[in-house]
Amino acid sequence: MLDAATYTPRLKAQYRETIRAAMKEEFGYKNDMQIPAVDKIVLNIGCGAEAVRDSKKAKSAIADLTQIAGQQAVGTLAKKSHAPFRLREGMIIGAKVTLRADRMYEFMDRLITVAMPRIRDFRGVKPSFDGRGNFAMGLKEHIVFPEIEFDKVDEVWGMDIIITTTAQDFGEHTADAQAKALLKHFNMPFNA
């Protein structure tokens, strides 16, 4: 049985033991605090019109995201009413969850080693960075995660995954270049 007090996620240990040293050598950081790290991972499922027609769909999305993340997801609320779509302000139209610390590393490990290989016709992910070292990607089907029982799914949802890093512009190296190098060390399968 695992002892919760001494358990360290595999990717967290890998970051401490090998990735930090490799990043320091690659970019020539003078201070260990300059070495970028993964700060948080935000998961989001948008239900859209499905949730407006049937409120059970939004509850289903929240339950599925909770299972995937291993942490309670919360509903995202509509900010404005929109009459043509029968959308009222305050209606639940999606689900989101923010992962940090050990749960973040556990999720990233499952994403890279289990979920991505299960994607049909997978050829890698497009390196989509925002200019500040944060990476965003989307999945068309949330059922690629093993926590989701395919037989019990009533709706297949798309999913946004945002990985936020602490990378900052350093000399001639942009925050995006450093974040991409960091994620490559975690074996993120970029296609370019």
Image (cartoon, helix red, strand yellow):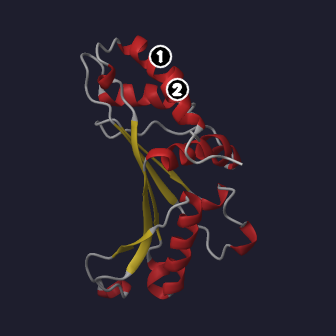
Question: Do we see residue 191 in this rendering?
Answer: no
| Residue at left offset 51%, top offset 50% | 103
User: Which element carries disc 2, helix, strand or loop?
Assistant: helix
| Residue depicted at 56% across the width and 39% down the height | 8
Residue on which the image places disc 1: 22
User: Residue 116 versus residue 32: which sits nearer the camera?
Assistant: 32
- The amino acid type of the residue labelled 1 equals Ala
The residue shown at (36%, 15%) is 27
User: Which residue in the protein does label 2 denote?
Assistant: 185
Question: Is residue 28 among what the camera can see?
Answer: yes
Instruction: Locate residue 34, reporting x and y percent.
Output: 30, 23
Percent position of residue 41, x then y: 43, 49
Q: Residue 23 sits in which quadrant?
A: top left
Q: Position of residue 18 (x, y in %)?
A: 52, 20
Q: Identify whether 166 is placed above or below 93.
A: above
Indicate the position of residue 143 as horizontal and vertical percent values: 65, 61
Q: CA distance from mark 2 to mark 1?
A: 8 Å
SS for tag 1?
Answer: helix
Badge 2 vs badge 1, beta-carbon distance below 8 Å: yes
Tell me if mark 1 has few (under 14), some (14-19) or many (20+) residues whose alpha carbon lies within 10 angstroms of its own: some
